[in-house]
Amino acid sequence: MKVDVKARKERRRRLKTAFLVIIAGGMAVFFLLPTVLTLANSFMTSQEISANYGMIFSEGDKKSYISEAVNLKFIPDMVSFKQYSTVLFKSPEYLLKFWNSVIYTAPILIIQIIIAVFAAYSFTRFRGRLKEIVFFAYIILMLMPYQVTLVPNYLVSDWLNILDTKWAIWLPGVASPFSVFLLTKFMRRIPNSLIEAAKIDGAGEWKVFTKICVPLCKGAIYSVAILIFIDYWNMVEQPLILLSDADMHPLSVFLSKINAGEISLAFAVASIYMIPSILVFLYGEEYLVEGISYSGGLKG
């Protein structure tokens, strides 16, 4: 009898596991479909794309309904590299915008992490009424959507005379409170016993910072870096408002302005644009999971 009960429980457990795996697999396929579709369509000819999606990107009456079925194809009839050739070799505009994205994102990522690590250590080790008020202000600013602070950023940039320059993008980015808040919450979970033991052994604040706090928060730092990169790599509102020169816009702005004449190139540009995000995620996946699942100063 006990054997039958155990067998039924084991069978139910396996069925439950199989059901959850099927659900998770279905959701993964569903969320990956747009990415796979973009990659597949980037190898299609302009004629094939127009035949499959011409009704969507037509310049006719926008109020009219699509009367013909849209053909979603994941395998091109004929593989073509013409779009990639145009983007990479014949049209420098796209590469210019790609490097604009790199130039805007890389300094923001590096400097914001440096500022956040030092600020988080300060909020963690040296507490007081003034610092708690400043930290509370950080939380309030973090809760505000970027659209709320866009007008003040514009006015400050105009006052500093940095509109239509890279500094208009860099300065608000490096001062973002998001990374400071997250790293502070992580550092405050480090056991005080570790820091006190280091202080007893003669370690100063710099050694405590570099040898204890930063290594223990390595997963959190990588997690924050990935989130910062994805956020600013895909920014659209900031350059549209703060940069009037279209040549200074990043590639994300171009992708938000797809028109019928460039739809064949848009798939290739979008595929190239996804490569850095995918590489960053694949490289830091372990750290991202570690940072999200972090529940204490030390891993169990």
Image: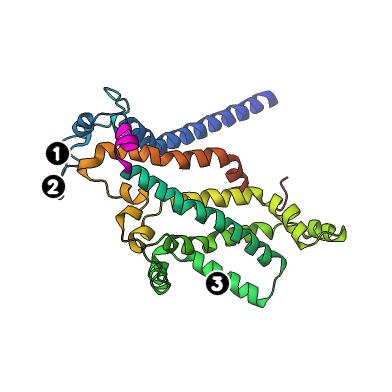
Indicate which disc, 2 or 3, sits on the residue closer to the N terminus.
Answer: 2
Residue 11 appears in view: yes
Q: Nearer the viewer, residue 272 or 193?
A: 272
Q: Nearer the viewer, residue 78 or 5?
A: 78
Q: Position of residue 67 (x, y in %)?
A: 14, 39
Residue 231 appears in view: no
| Three-letter code, disc 3 | Ala
Residues at circles 1 and 3 in contact by the CB criterion of under 8 Å: no
Q: Residue at x 45, y 54 (%)?
A: 104
Residues at circles 2 and 1 in contact by the CB criterion of under 8 Å: yes
| Three-letter code, disc 2 | Ser
Indicate which disc, 1 or 3, sits on the residue closer to the N terminus.
Answer: 1
Which residue is tagged 3? 137
Q: Position of residue 8 (x, y in %)?
A: 60, 27
Report the residue that reaches farthest toward the bottom: 129
Which residue is tagged 2? 64
Q: Which region shows up in magenta?
A: 84-92
Residue count near mark 3 (Cα–Cα under 10 Å), binned few <14, some 14–19, many ≥20: few
SS under mark 2? loop
User: Is residue 101 found inside the magenta-colored segment of the image?
Assistant: no
| Three-letter code, disc 1 | Ser
Which quadrant holds residue 209?
bottom right
Query: How far, Cα to Cα, is label 1 from label 3?
Result: 53 Å
Q: Residue at x 75, y 54 (%)?
A: 212
Q: Residue at x 26, y 22 (%)?
A: 77
